[in-house]
């Protein structure tokens, strides 16, 4: 159950649309395929290679590099490498945050990334960080898809649990 949320997020977020040929795309697609097959250890070097190729070929702040970091982070977490996952999540969040503007899909991806990192912040008892990330997730989703969207259920519920627990 612990990684079910991460698996669903990676499947939903996926990578760049099939047929687009970007540096590191083949590796990214293969890493996602291996991850979805439950082969986390096999997916790790492929996902790391996708990050390296995209960083080399593109500006380090390019959103495609952020996608690669995001995928690597989720795979690292699933493989039990929490410290490496945290670093990769931070790199992905940094890239998403540095974008002058994001298209709707990328902004929704950012909301998903914030939500999953908030979930892991709660696991690590970093409640203040989690609260800020859940609030930002909620703000993004309300603005883009409305305040009655089912995508608000988990972040609102989790935020409520944290705030109730903190009294």
Image: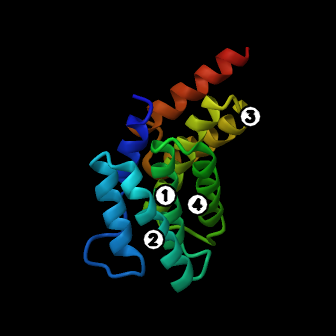
Who comes first in sequence, dot 2 or dot 3? 2
Query: Mark on residue 128?
Result: 3
Q: Nearer the viewer, mark 2 or mark 4?
A: 2
Q: Position of residue 100 (x, y in %)?
A: 63, 72
Mark 2 lies on residue: 50
Count of number-bearing discs? 4
Q: What residue sits right under mark 4 in the picture? A: 92
Residues packed near mark 3 inside 10 Å, few (<14), some (14 to 19) or many (20 plus): few
Residues at marks 2 and 3 touching, judged by CB atoms closer than 8 Å: no
Report the front residue among 12 and 7: 7
Q: Residue at image x 66%, y 32%?
A: 124
Q: Position of residue 87 (x, y in %)?
A: 64, 54
> Taking 31 as reference, is 165 above or below it?
above
The structure residue drawn at horizontal position 66% and vertical position 68%, both measured from the top left corner, is: 98
Q: Sequence order check: which comes first, mark 1 or mark 4? A: 1
Q: Which residue is mark 1?
A: 72
- Indicate which label's residue lies in the foreground, 4 or 3: 4
Q: Quadrant of the C terminus?
A: top right
State the separation of the CA atoms marked 2 and 4: 13 Å
Pick the residue in front: 78 or 89: 78
């Amino acid at each position: 159950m612990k990684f079910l949320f991460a698996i669903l997020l990676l499947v939903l977020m996926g990578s760049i649309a099939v047929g687009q040929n970007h540096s590191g795309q083949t590796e990214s697609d293969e890493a996602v395929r291996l991850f979805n097959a439950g082969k986390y250890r096999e997916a790790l070097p492929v996902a790391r290679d996708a990050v390296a190729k995209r960083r080399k070929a593109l500006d380090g702040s390019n959103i495609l590099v952020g996608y690669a970091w995001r995928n690597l982070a989720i795979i690292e977490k699933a493989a039990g490498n929490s410290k490496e996952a945290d670093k990769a999540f931070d790199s992905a969040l940094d890239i998403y945050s540095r974008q002058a503007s994001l298209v709707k899909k990328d902004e929704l991806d950012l909301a998903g990334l914030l939500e999953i990192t908030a979930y892991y912040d709660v696991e690590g008892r970093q409640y203040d960080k989690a609260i800020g990330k859940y609030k930002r997730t909620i703000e993004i989703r309300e603005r883009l898809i409305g305040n009655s969207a089912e995508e608000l259920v988990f972040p609102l519920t989790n935020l409520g649990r944290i705030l109730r627990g903190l009294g």
